[in-house]
Amino acid sequence: MNLQDTYLNRLRKERIPVNVFLVKGTRLQGVITFFDQFTLLLENGGTQQLVYKHSIATIVPSRPVKNLFTEQQESDNG
């Protein structure tokens, strides 16, 4: 698993609210409920937005993501 997938998966699993800033400056807010190679699904207040990754500049979580590589290291060592 690469850094992007590891990071997005942790945000999804822990349901950490995020601010997603698009290349054109628009800010989207929500929780990542799904992602694949090209898109991510953001949910906020019952509304879903499918966002294409090529339009994303930055993803800012509402709190730090701790021990990001703990799961990765355990699976690599096992």
Image (cartoon, rainbow, N blue to C red):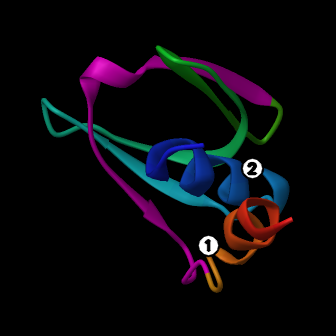
The amino acid type, in three-letter code, at marker 1 is Phe
User: How far is mark 1 from mark 2, CA to CA?
Assistant: 15 Å
Q: Is residue 59 left or right of residue 39?
A: left
Quarter of the view holding residue 41: top right
50 or 68, which is in the foreground? 68
Dot 1: few (<14), some (14–19), or many (≥20) neighbours within 10 Å?
few
Q: Is residue 21 left or right of residue 69?
A: left
Is 64 inside the magenta-drawn segment?
Answer: yes
Residue 40: percent from left, percent from top? 57, 26
Left-right relation of 78 to 52: right
In this view, 2 is above or below 65: above
Task: Identify whether 14 is placed above or below 28.
Answer: below
Q: Earlier in the sequence, mark 1 or mark 2?
A: 2
Q: Is residue 1 above or below residue 53?
A: below
What percent of the width, then of the height, locates residue 74? Answer: 80, 72
Does the magenta stretch mainly form a helix, a strand or a loop?
strand
Q: Nearer the viewer, residue 40 or 62?
A: 40
* Residue 8 in magenta stretch: no
Find the residue positioned furthest to the front.
78
Q: Which residue is mark 2?
A: 12
Q: Quadrant of residue 66?
A: bottom right
| Relative side of 30 to 74, left or right | left
Q: Residue at x 12, y 30 (%)?
A: 24
Which sits in the foreground, 64 or 77?
77
- Circle number at residue 38: none
Q: Secondary structure at mark 2?
A: helix
Q: Magenta residues, as a range?
A: 47-65
Residue at 57% across / 81% down in the picture? 63
Q: Quadrant of the C terminus?
A: bottom right
According to the picture, the residue beneath numbered tag 1 turns out to be: 69
